[in-house]
Amino acid sequence: MRSFDLPSHRIGAIVLAPLLLLPAAQPPIALPITVTSPNSQIKFDLSVRSENRLAYRVTLKGRPVIELSRLGIVVDGVNIGDGATVAGVERTQKDERYRTRGVHSVAIDRYNAVTIALIHQLTGTRYSVEVRAFDDGVAFRYVVPAGAKVTRVPDEATDFNFPPRSVVWYHDLEGHYEGVHERKEIEDVGEGDWAAPPVTTQLPDGSGYASVTEAALKDFAGMVLQTDRRAGFAARLAHAAPASYPYRLRYAALDVRRLEAPASITGAITTPWRVILAGTDLNTLVNSDVISNLSAPPDPALFPQGLDTPWVKPGRAVWRYLDGGENTFDGIKDFSDMAGNLGFEYQVVEGLWRRWTDDQLRELVTFSKERHVGILLWVHSRDIQKADARRELFQRLHGFGVAGVKIDFFDHEAKEIIDLYQAILSDAAAFQLLVDFHGANKPAGESRTWPNELTREGVYGLEHRAQAWARHNTTLPFTRYLAGHGDYTPVVLGDRRRETSWPHQIATAAIFTSPLLVYGANPKSLLENPAVELIKALPSTWDETIVLPGSSIGEVAAFARRKGDQWFVAVLNGPEARTLRVELKFLGPRSYNSTLVRDDPDNAAAERIERAMLTRQGSLEISLRAGGGFIARLVPGKS
């Protein structure tokens, strides 16, 4: 449990040790080179195998997280991780906190680090591997300084070998990042499977959990993973992966072929961080700040108050797309009216707006603002690939008073697409526009650098129909959502929810982290729901999150989340009925007036609402139907 005073600025210290350069007369640096987390539980060891091939391993409390695995980067077709010698070591430390958004409100950036200077024996290339060991994971990246050759082509040569008897969850790339995770024993993983990060594993013998992904993705192609014949996962860059079905559908064959070529880099090569989250429990993974820590803080020229810059405001949104409502100008105005009645801060409007006159757009924005509702408008990414067209549109929308944009149809992680994400975020910030990316890849810490990115899709959500949701929804909090916020468009109370119950649907809004929380339901159904007052009270960001005991990937996701002095307890159940007991020790010393929304055992399209006075000495016994759920709001009474 986190209990921090919110700092008004970042507080930290960095301790540098001198670079240990090796005179020729001195013996070589002893291997392995080890960096240990501040709490001493996680260790990263870099060693050299036969023929001077770099390798690494990661352990948690002395137990393997990543078995001995290959470490390397390819430059112009040569793996400079093979045939490398160590030329020096520099050690650093850091311990600071900063404001963050989503899972909790204060991030901890505390690590021990090592920078290992290397020389490739064959080509003479000098480069470094930077490693950071946090209390909840490790990360490493490669830095190749600019050389005599101005432009070079990098590629990946890193492996992630999980221990025998691990269990892994991953999905393929056919839908880009909109896939359904499969659970597999590591020994049953076939060779050649494609996997979209994060790939989460349950380590053997109850020793913990780990998840592999990346951070600080910019000026580089995205990383995906592919299984090898040893049941490990090899890092690949986007050009090597098959183009997704959405990309093949929307873009010409010429584009598909062009993006199959690896991208060149001009100047220094700095890869994104390769991240391995690790912890003894799921709570550690869900609360990890590693991905955010590895990303740059915001530019004060664009965000003078960081997350508190006035126009950068998280909130809840209505959306006319999944669950009925008139797809007309007047129908969209009605949605803004209902958003105001719910106390929601935004409405997301699909492409219908492009058929309106400027006067109509101004009318909608004015009408919505009178109800304290901001408007985000859908845009095709193809229409704003060129900088002039993008800035012209953003300036126009800003002039109308539009709050932000929902930009769709990326569907690839080639470097030119990653560059487009960055350009959009930069130009949107210049015109004070919020951003919601759809048809998108996984997040990699962009929202720290660009606080105007409030969410992105990159998740198989309720836009899809042909899916049994219970297993999927209890997997996502411990797989996809470890990478960051996701626009699942939760909460639909009609047939699209399939086998899940109303309480399950409402609880997704409290468990799926998204600072722009876009509800899939017609707002009329929310206003008419018996639990409407609880729905109105659900925030889109949290001060504290606790993954409760009893949570299990693909079976149960049970969270306690705090906003201010209020707590919410939310549970998503998988495909099997069960009873869960939740101890309330996380509560403060006062009594709490509580609203409990339970499954109706006789009707999934119903709920039972109870009122109770609860204290930290008590507990909740929760009966969950198959695909069921539970959500409670706990408000402290007078002391």
Image (tube, rainbow, N blue to C red):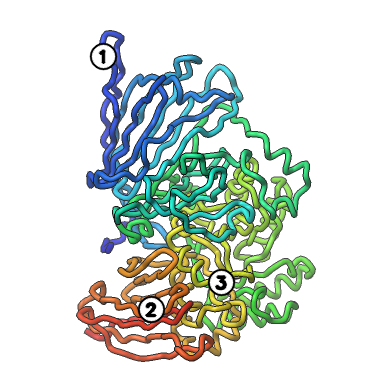
Q: CA distance from mark 2 to mark 3?
A: 18 Å
> Residue placed at 46% from the left, 40% from the top?
230
Note whether 142 is above or below 519 in the view shown.
Answer: above
Which residue in the structure is indicated by mark 2?
A: 578
Q: Residues within 10 Å of mark 3 (few under 14, many from 20)?
A: some
Identify the amino acid type marked 1: Pro
Q: Is residue 486 visible?
A: yes
State how far apart marks 1 and 3 are (Cα). Answer: 61 Å
Q: Is residue 420 left or right of residue 272?
A: right
Q: Amino acid at mark 2?
A: Arg
In this rendering, the label closer to the viewer, 1 or 3: 3
Callout 2 crowding tier (Cα within 10 Å): few <14, some 14–19, many ≥20: some
Q: Quadrant of the C terminus?
A: bottom left
Looking at the image, is 480 positioned above or below residue 295? Answer: below
Q: Amino acid at mark 3?
A: Ala
Q: Position of residue 466 (x, y in %)?
A: 63, 70
Earlier sequence position, callout 2 versus callout 1: 1
Question: Which residue, as the protein is rendered here, is positioned at the far top?
Answer: 25
Helix, strand or loop under label 2 = strand
Disc count in the image?
Answer: 3
Viewer-side residue, 380 vs 461 = 461
Tag 1 residue: 27
